[in-house]
Amino acid sequence: SVPYYYDGMRYVGIEKFVTCAEEFKRFGECKSLMICTVEATTHYDYISSNFPSTVHTTAPSLDALKDMLVNGACNVIATEQLQIFNSDIEEGVANGTYVLGGKAFTKEPLAVVTRKNDREWSDIVNWVVRALIHGEKKGLKRDMSLCGQGNNNLVPFDLAFDNAVYCVGNYGEIFYTNFDRRDRAPINTINNGTPMIYAIPHGNINSRETFDLDSGDESSNDVARLDINENDFLRCGVVSIEDSRGDLTGLSVDYCHALAAALFHGNSAALTLEFFAEDDYNAIDALLNGTIDVLAGSQVNLETDVWLQFSTPYFYQNAENGDEVKVFALATRNDDTYFSSFVHSIMLTTVYAQESGITQESNRGMPLISVFGTEYSWAMREAIAYSGSYDEMYHKHFGTSPLQRGRNQLNINETSQLLSPSMNFR
């Protein structure tokens, strides 16, 4: 599903040493720094890559980690905020014994995971999460007088998703049922126009086991499935969308070229483009019947999500009524999870490059990958060699002025990240 909780590795412990860890300082007053982390975790990977072994040690479990801070085996622990909720460590933070660092050093978004071979169920789960977020944005709350009403049709886009809110509660109600109000970090609040471009972590991009490529699953075991068609070119549909701030259609076209470059060894021209009006449902039909392979500028909504998979959004646009937000992404068919994952990865690559300070000129700084097979190990580099980072793409089509960018900026300050496309509630 879309993430429902954003977290990351932070330092918790004695204030002086938390500052030392955040500043990577190990001398002077910081010479006694000792960081504890749980073994075999992303936190351990980060700490071991950024500190020598003399200043960190491991714990076998989260409970043991907390005990090591309390008994003085370390003066800082590396963990996530969620993992200290309702614990002695949180009480220690509240009474001033410990401090919680203000910066997250890793990304650890949480979501609901479903099987890749059941897209209908996956869509239902995804839109339930979105319904909870939409309910809070609209001020709708748990209301047992409305619970259980609405359409009982089991077609995903026709389900009464508002029952998730009326019967259980909106996102905020559920959060405050389980945690203190002080525990809700700004990033886990409803977005009202602050930067939202955010790259979900790529994970282990050098392990082909991620996709069970050798499992015999017809939908994923053949690297050649990324060969789009026998002519070796990408057929990219583009929805032509007007935006007063600049050329949104041009941005979508550049994502098509970046994807072609990633697929065809740097050949960004290995594609055909077919343009559709914003309200032309032929665009969806063309994707579903195989006339095109991917649709750029597709608006994320409940009805089309039944047949399509969407990448992380690359553009947010305020709707005409000023209240709702249109969300645009790359769309692929539901029946090819492997190709959809590749498309999603290339969109995220442009944001990853921006976060890492990698530009079109310095594209060799992008990592090589093996998760899609050795033929595509240079895919991320070749995409950025064409497009550059997200900001380079945005500046090309919208100019360099920071005014009116709104949500279309990297969320580097951990501001509000929760937003759902519009949904019709009773």
Image (spheres, rainbow, N blue to C red):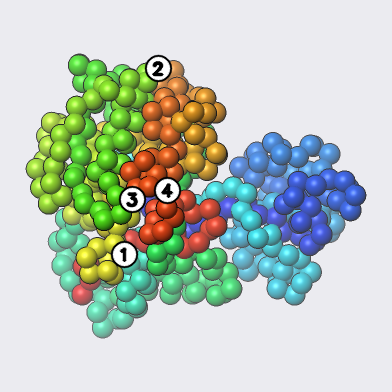
Return the disc, 1 or 4, that comes first in the chain's sequence: 1
Q: Which mark is residue 131?
A: 1
Q: Position of residue 61 (x, y in %)?
A: 68, 49
Return the disc, 1 or 3, that comes first in the chain's sequence: 1
* Mark 4 lies on residue: 400
Q: Which mark is residue 315?
A: 3
Return the disc, 2 or 3, that comes first in the chain's sequence: 3
Q: Position of residue 256 (x, y in %)?
A: 28, 33
From the viewer's perspective, tell me whether residue 424 is left or right of residue 384: left
* Distance in Å between CA atoms under marks 4 and 3: 16 Å
* Distance in Å between CA atoms under marks 1 and 4: 35 Å
Return the disc, 4 or 3, that comes first in the chain's sequence: 3
Q: Which mark is residue 375?
A: 2
Q: How many residues crowd around disc 2 within 10 Å: few (fewer than 14), some, or many (20 or more)?
A: some
**Which SS class for mark 2?**
helix
Q: Position of residue 90 (x, y in %)?
A: 68, 68
Q: How many residues crowd around disc 1 within 10 Å: few (fewer than 14), some, or many (20 or more)?
A: many
Labels 2 and 1 touching (C-beta < 8 A): no
Vertical placement of 175 versus 370: above or below?
A: below
Q: Amino acid at mark 3?
A: Phe
Asked whether residue 309 is in view, the answer is no
**4 or 2: mark nearer the eye:** 4
Q: Amino acid at mark 2?
A: Glu
* Distance in Å between CA atoms under marks 2 and 1: 40 Å
Q: Amino acid at mark 4?
A: Thr
Labels 1 and 4 touching (C-beta < 8 A): no
Labels 4 and 2 touching (C-beta < 8 A): no
Vertical placement of 392 versus 420: above or below?
A: above
Q: Position of residue 292 (x, y in %)?
A: 17, 32
